[in-house]
Amino acid sequence: MKMALYQKIEDDLSVIFRYLEPSNEFVGRLKLGRHQISSILQQTTIDEKNIALVAALLEVPDHRQEAVMHDFIAALRSSGQDHIANIFHQESDKVPMSEEHCQLLSKSMHDVCQFLEPRDGLIEWLLSNGIFTSSNSSSLLYSKLRVNDMARQTIEILQRKSDDSFEKFITALNETKQDHVAYILTGAGRQPMSAEHRKLLESKKTELEIFCDPVNGVISELVKSDTISGGNQEERIRSKTDLNDMTRELVETLMRKHDGAFDAFTKALNITGQSHVTYILTGEGNNQPVTKECRDRLIGKRSAVVKSIYAKCLVSTLISKRVFSSHDQRRVEHHELSNTEKGELIIDLIARKSQSAFVSFIDILKECHHEHVAEELMGSEVVGQLKMQSHMDKEIREDHDDKELVDKMQHAFENNDTEVKTIDEVLSSNGISVTDIENGSIIVKFRCRDHAALASLENLYSSKQLDQLFTDSFLFWLAEKGLKALCLEIADEELQRHKELKLMTEEHREALLSSADHLVDKLTISDALLDKLLLCPRRRQTIERAGTPQQQARTLLDIVSRQPDSAFIQLLSALTTTEQHEAVTIISGDYKYAKKSTTGEYRTMHTEDTGNRFNSTKTAVNILRYG
């Protein structure tokens, strides 16, 4: 009996090496020496542990073989390995995984690992149905393995189980909505996502991260259609705080699904107003994502414009024009966000939308008294008029409207023709471009990149350099028509209007916001004051409904700080007119010195010329500070 058992181990070494799981639970039940147990547990891989185990068993003295073998078999049964114990002493019909099933799992390993999702109920099912042990479950669920590696390890554990575990594994796949993985092994069920669709999702992943907004209804639609589970999968996706990371998690989840998940994803995108994201995947439709140029504007100007956006004036119109969804509204109007954080969120959301949504956003900015923000993002569009002078005329002719010249100019600027090369170079070097030429005494539209470019345009215009550039560019055509020159006219009001749309300077904004603590008890918010500030109805109502006088004062200062820079001087002028001179002094910093007295009050000596308080361009200020 002793030699028979000892011989049995030698005869079935290949079975032991292939199927035995040397878990801590199993090894701990063996009656081997401390040194031998330690040697087994110190090994890294299963194969190394099994080699050490067999070596320890073969070293057992003859007189202990029967007892050790008895404990060996008992340890196998207690650790869920009856299929191996039955090799030594059969007590049930459980046998190791068949060669056929092992080979099928091995050959399908690559495909299975691409689609198998062990984390969403599969491991728990296998544990509760006695296929996996608690040791198997813990080694997977509490590991830091990537999902593909976790899937591979799941299959490798399964290959060491009894043969009836294969069919139970197929049942587990079907019950955990992974019948597409069962299809790989059995040919039954839904097919896994096609290579074409997986390749599309993988190759477009970066673009999807930039433009897809999973929180904006997409996740909910996919849960509703049973494409992703409303438990672990949804929680795992939503747990990502960054939208880019959330989209990546969503895409990687979808890539492990059946092929219908791709169509479910595009359907969810279309339902939630994200057909521009569908365009990225399919190339179909007219709704394309925001262009790189416009995204660059949003990103490059973000830090400046978010301080000038007042969300309360925009959200309702963004919704009514279908630029924002109700999801967007809830996020932007979250009570814990500051006004600047709301502005940041608006810009971030617009950057993920379609080009048509971006165009609508710019129009809404203009419509909702945010022209200064629109100009900061898109630049100033200055309209001028070209007039023609003939050799016979001393005066410039205003009634000469030549469609042929207009068409020629349009073609030249659109195609960067040779005749406009010089004017293009001069304009572009100053951040200016010609965006359109229209009929009607030859209307010319200039786009100025920023306010520095606007100043350059004014200099080029006032110096008559633009007249010369236009005349030289079209001299040949002018001569044929008996014309002498082209003269540009830009109304002073046109230039002044754009100048007044410059964003509030950091200096002036800081002067307003840092004054708040000192002004809340000194500012009187009256109809007379508000009338002079020329606020839109919504901004004015927000101030009037702010509650306490102190809250009204803070709201007023915040709103003015988000207006064009001209609003700073307008506020000081309105305060002066309503005889709130102390407030003017605090905001403008127009004082010789200020010092806190022992009574806690400030003593301030003012300059005599109080009129300079609100006319000075250096107004921002060191607000009174504790000595």
Image (cartoon, grey):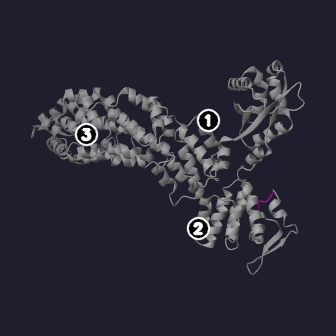
Which is more N-terminal, label 3 or label 1? 3
Left or right: where 135 falls relative to 245:
left
* Vertical placement of residue 66 versus 109, above or below: below
The residue wearing badge 1 is 293
Residue 542: percent from the left, percent from the top?
A: 59, 63
- Magenta-tinted stretch: 618-622
1 and 3 marks in contact (CB < 8 Å):
no
Name the one closer to the observer, 578 or 598.
578
* Vertical placement of residue 192 versus 212, above or below: above
* Vertical placement of residue 394 versus 41, above or below: above
In the rendered structure, which amino acid carries the disc numbered 3? Glu
Left or right: where 302 falls relative to 456:
left
Tell me the mark number nearer the camera, choosing from 1 and 2: 2
Tell me the mark number nearer the camera, choosing from 2 and 3: 2
Q: CA distance from mark 1 to mark 2?
A: 39 Å
* 212 inside magenta stretch: no
- Location of the N terminus by quadrant is top left
Tell me the mark number nearer the camera, choosing from 1 and 3: 1
Task: Tell me the SS state at disc 1.
Answer: helix
Residue 447 position by quadrant: top right
Which is more N-terminal, label 2 or label 1? 1
1 and 2 marks in contact (CB < 8 Å):
no
- Residue at 32 percent of width and 29 percent of height: 111
Which is more N-terminal, label 3 or label 2? 3
Residue 546 is tagged as 2
Q: CA distance from mark 1 to mark 3?
A: 59 Å
Residue 319 appearing in the image: yes
- Residue at 59 percent of width and 35 percent of height: 292
Task: Tell me the SS state at disc 3.
Answer: loop
The residue wearing badge 3 is 21
The local crowd at label 3, few if under 14, some if 14 to 19, many if 20 or more residues have their Cα within 10 Å, is many
Residue 618: percent from the left, percent from the top?
A: 81, 57
